[in-house]
Image: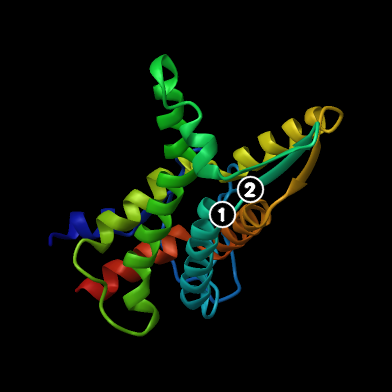
Amino acid sequence: MTGHDSDLDALIACPVCDALYRMAEVPNGGRARCRRCDTVLMAPRAGAMTQIVMLSATALILMIAAIFFPFLEMSTGGVDRRSSVIDAILAYSNGLMLPLSVAVASLIVILPTLRLMAILYAIGPMMIGHAPWRHATEAFRLATALKPWAMAEVFIVGVAVALVKMSGLATVSMGPAFWAFVALVLVTTLKDTFMCRLTVWKTIEERQR
């Protein structure tokens, strides 16, 4: 590696305003912020990788429960009906509505699950002190790219709005999958709070050498 390449590797860019900074050591519990837009650039925490892996594994279990358990139960006119997330996806699987079914399945199930699995693959071995597995860089890059497209929280907000509108037409009760989705959103949010992307990138690069 030339001196010029080494200088470039020591630079980090703010993800919001693209301001360049020279990478420096940040102590656990500290924060490095962009001087231009105040975005947090690095925020390492002691034991963060363990917390990220545990929360990701928990979110993956909650996702499985949210998919297969009953989501809602509606009662109207003496007729009871239970529906799951799978039922909601398959409801649009015929004819011209098939693309909508694929989009719903992708945004609330497939992409969030893929992102959680990519995080576990990239960070899991490092949590126990091992070198990252092969293609850990690509896995974490995929997890970062999928973050805006994993929309389980948007789904929950949409369901809440629909429940308000349906409350006058039928008796609606939430099933275990609904609460699993709520817990999934909370756990995912907490996991993203603990995860400092630059710290993860730096750790992967150091342990791959």
Of the image marks 2 and 1, the number of the one nearer the N terminus: 1
Residue that badge 2 annotates? 71
Task: Name the spot of residue 54 as percent of width and height, x first.
Answer: 50, 74
Q: Nearer the viewer, residue 74 or 22?
A: 74
Image quadrant occupied by the N terminus: bottom left
Q: Nearer the viewer, residue 183 or 90?
A: 90
Residue furthest to the top in view is 96
Q: Secondary structure at mark 1?
A: helix
What residue is drawn where x is 13% and y is 59%? 2
Q: Secondary structure at mark 2?
A: loop
Q: Is residue 99 visible?
A: yes
Name the residue type under label 1: Ala
In the rendered view, would you say 204 is above or below 112? below
In the rendered view, would you say 11 is above or below 17? below
> Is residue 133 shown left or right of residue 203?
left
Name the residue type under label 2: Phe
> Is residue 83 shown left or right of residue 196?
right
Mark closer to the observer (2, 1):
2
> Is label 2 in contact with label 1 (beta carbons under 8 Å)?
yes
Task: Name the spot of residue 6 as percent of width and height, x first.
Answer: 23, 60
> Is residue 96 shown left or right of residue 160?
left
Task: Name the spot of residue 34 as percent of width and height, x first.
Answer: 56, 50
